[in-house]
Amino acid sequence: MRHATRKLDLTGQRYGNLTVLAPAENIGKRTAWRCRCSCGRETVVKTYHLRSGHTQSCGCQNGGGEPRHALGLSYIDGTCVELLAAKTVRRDNTSGVPGVDWWTSKGRWRAAICFKGRRYYLGSYNRFEDAVKARKRAEEDMHDQFLREFAQQTAQKEGNS
């Protein structure tokens, strides 16, 4: 006989700089929570990431403890607009293309993209060029669209002030 599991209620609890406000829509099959950071921004975080200490802020904290947005960075839904627009390649990247790596166990190139706190698997490919093409298409669909909308909203705000 299977026992019914009770869902934890984390409402009102504090994890690092985050205070849990309410349940949020699940992320995949994982329970998630809407949280307010001590900087005032809201974010959605999986239960495990809260309870394990993996996520302790909205992403606003840099290594020195100074809020990143105090450094002129804009975060929306956990995504840094300036870093997305810069399209930088991480130092530990071995393929030279963000989100594309060699999947040793399968002997194939793998493509993925992260956006708004979620990782999207884009497929595995025999040819490096095909993995790059899948990643670039996802960047256009997700990142570039997001950046265009951000630019439009910013222009509208500046036009209204």
Image: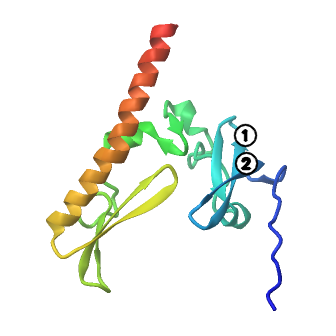
User: x%, y% of residue 76?
Assistant: 53, 38
Q: Nearer the viewer, residue 107 or 8?
A: 8
Q: Is residue 73 left or right of residue 59?
A: left
Residue 96 in view of the camera: no
Please tell me in which quadrant of the rendered image residue 121 appears.
bottom left
Q: In the rendered structure, which amino acid carries the disc numbered 2?
A: Leu
User: x%, y% of residue 57?
Assistant: 65, 48
Please tell me in which quadrant of the rendered image residue 5 appears.
bottom right
Q: Is residue 93 left or right of residue 3?
A: left
Please tell me in which quadrant of the rendered image residue 105 appears.
bottom left
Question: Relative to residue 16, is residue 100 depicted above or below?
Answer: below
Q: CA distance from mark 1 to mark 2?
A: 6 Å
Q: In the rendered structure, which amino acid carries the disc numbered 1?
A: Ser
Q: Secondary structure at mark 1?
A: loop
Q: Secondary structure at mark 2?
A: strand
Question: Relative to residue 65, is residue 23 depicted above or below?
Answer: below
Residue at the spot 50% in from the left edge and 49% down from the top edge:
116
Q: Residue furthest bottom?
A: 1
Residue at the spot 60% in from the left edge and 68% down from the top edge:
29
Q: Where does label 1 land, which residue?
A: 38
User: x%, y% of residue 3?
Assistant: 83, 84
Question: Relative to residue 161, is residue 15 depicted above or below?
Answer: below
**Mark sitting on residue 119:** none
Q: Where does label 2 land, which residue?
A: 18
10 Å crowding of disc 2: few (<14), some (14-19), many (20+): many
Q: Is residue 42 left or right of residue 85?
A: right
Sequence-wise first label, 1 or 2: 2
Q: Is residue 29 left or right of residue 12?
A: left
